[in-house]
Amino acid sequence: MKTDLSAALFAQAKAVIPGGVDSPVRACKAVGCDPLFLKKAKGAVVVDV
């Protein structure tokens, strides 16, 4: 899974949204990762940006 674009989008989101995300995604900090930004998802299949 690609994460470079997700990291860039998260940096942009932090400039306009406190913490860059809504509450549930803040759990990513607990495991030391940035949230992933997804293009679409259906069932167990996800497509990253």
Image (spheres, rainbow, N blue to C red):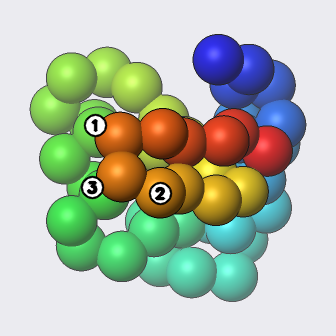
Question: Which mark is in front, 2 or 1?
Answer: 2
Left or right side of 41 for 30: left
Left or right side of 43 for 11: right
Label 2: how many residues lie within 10 Å, few (<14), some (14-19) or many (20+)?
few
The Cα–Cα distance between marks 2 and 1, rounded to whole angstroms, is 25 Å
CB-based contact (under 8 Å), mark 1 and mark 3: yes
Residue 37 x %, y %? 62, 51
Task: Please give the name of the residue rendered at 69% of the width and 24% of the height, measured from the top-left corner.
Answer: 3
CB-based contact (under 8 Å), mark 2 and mark 1: no
First-in-chain label (2 vs 1) = 1
Residue 25 x %, y %? 31, 57
Q: Name the residue that disc number 1 marks.
A: 29
Q: Which mark is residue 39?
A: none
Label 3: how many residues lie within 10 Å, few (<14), some (14-19) or many (20+)?
some
Task: Please give the name of the residue rendered at 47% of the width and 77% of the height, measured from the top-left corner.
Answer: 18
First-in-chain label (2 vs 3) = 3
Q: Residue furthest front?
A: 43
Label 1: how many residues lie within 10 Å, few (<14), some (14-19) or many (20+)?
few
Task: Please give the name of the residue rendered at 21% of the width and 23% of the height, measured from the top-left corner.
Answer: 31
Residue 10 x %, y %? 66, 52
Q: Name the residue that disc number 3 marks.
A: 26
What kind of element bears circle 2?
A: strand
**Could you say which is closer to the camera, residue 14 or residue 7?**
7
Residue 28 x %, y %? 29, 39
- Is 41 above or below relative to 27? below
**Could you say which is closer to the camera, residue 14 or residue 38?**
38
Kind of residue at badge 1 = Lys
Q: Which mark is residue 42?
A: 2
Task: Please give the name of the residue rendered at 69% of the width and 39% of the height, measured from the top-left corner.
Answer: 48
What kind of element bears circle 3?
A: helix
